[in-house]
Amino acid sequence: MAKERSERGGDRKDNREERDSEFIDKLVHINRVAKVVKGGKRFGFAALVVVGDQKGRVGFGHGKAREVPEAVRKATESAKRVLIRVPLREGRTLHHDIDGRWGAGKVTLRAAPPGTGIIAGGPMRAVFESVGVADVVAKSKGSSNPYNMVRATFDALKKQTSPRSVAARRGKKVSDVLRRRDPDAAVE
């Protein structure tokens, strides 16, 4: 039976490893916490990790453990369970400008022309690199707590819509929904 499985291309465990290898994970933040006990201090670690396939799917997770590698592993598994899909324009930028917030953390994300790169702070940069956005301008206002910034960025990305979905919702053609993107046009 084991021979049959290997001839068919492996069993489920091998298949899962292939699927997991398509994701990249970025460690955003590690927090060390101490519990004071009779013999001294016991240290624990909390990790915030962003996981993405660089093709529009991204998720984040939080893991806590006594050792850093175990906390990172837990956070990565948690992130893979809550992936969201983000529509990208030309596979490199956002379709439209958007604001997001979580708690006191507020972010503004703006689509950018080719060659701009990722102009964003640390936690937001990790999210954009994981999702596969190559050109974006982002600004963080309010809380600089990495957890709030990542969650506010995800809040904004969840609101992102593609012209195809807007056209389908309105019962129109995509060309009717899209206005012409002309760089020489006067901005009002």
Image (cartoon, grey):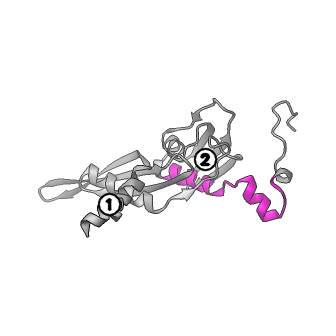
Comparing 115 with 32, the one in front is 115
**What residue did someone put label 2 on?**
107
Q: Which secondary structure class fits the magenta region best?
A: helix
For this view, does 48 lie left or right of residue 65? right
What is the three-letter code of the residue carrying label 1?
A: Glu
Q: Which residue is drawn at 33% across and 52% down?
A: 72
Question: Which residue in the rendered view is the most extreme toward the left?
Answer: 39
Q: Quadrant of the rendered structure where residue 184 is?
A: top right
Q: Quadrant of the N terminus?
A: bottom left
First-in-chain label (1 vs 2): 1
**Residue 7 disc label:** 1
* Image vertical order of residue 169 relative to residue 56, above or below: below
Kind of residue indicated by mark 2: Val
Residue 168, quarter of the rendered image: bottom right
Q: How many labels does the image show?
A: 2
User: Which sits in the foreground, 83 or 32?
Assistant: 83
Residue 29: image location, x then y, percent: 39, 46
As displayed, is residue 164 above or below residue 131? Answer: below
Residue for point 57% across, 35% down: 118
Q: Which residue is located at x 48 percent, y 43 percent?
A: 126
Q: Is residue 26 left or right of residue 86?
A: left
What x and y, as percent, mark residue 67?
24, 52
Q: Quadrant of the C terminus?
A: top right
> Which residues fall within the magenta stretch?
147-174
- Residue 166 belongs to the span the image colors magenta: yes
For label 2, the SS is strand
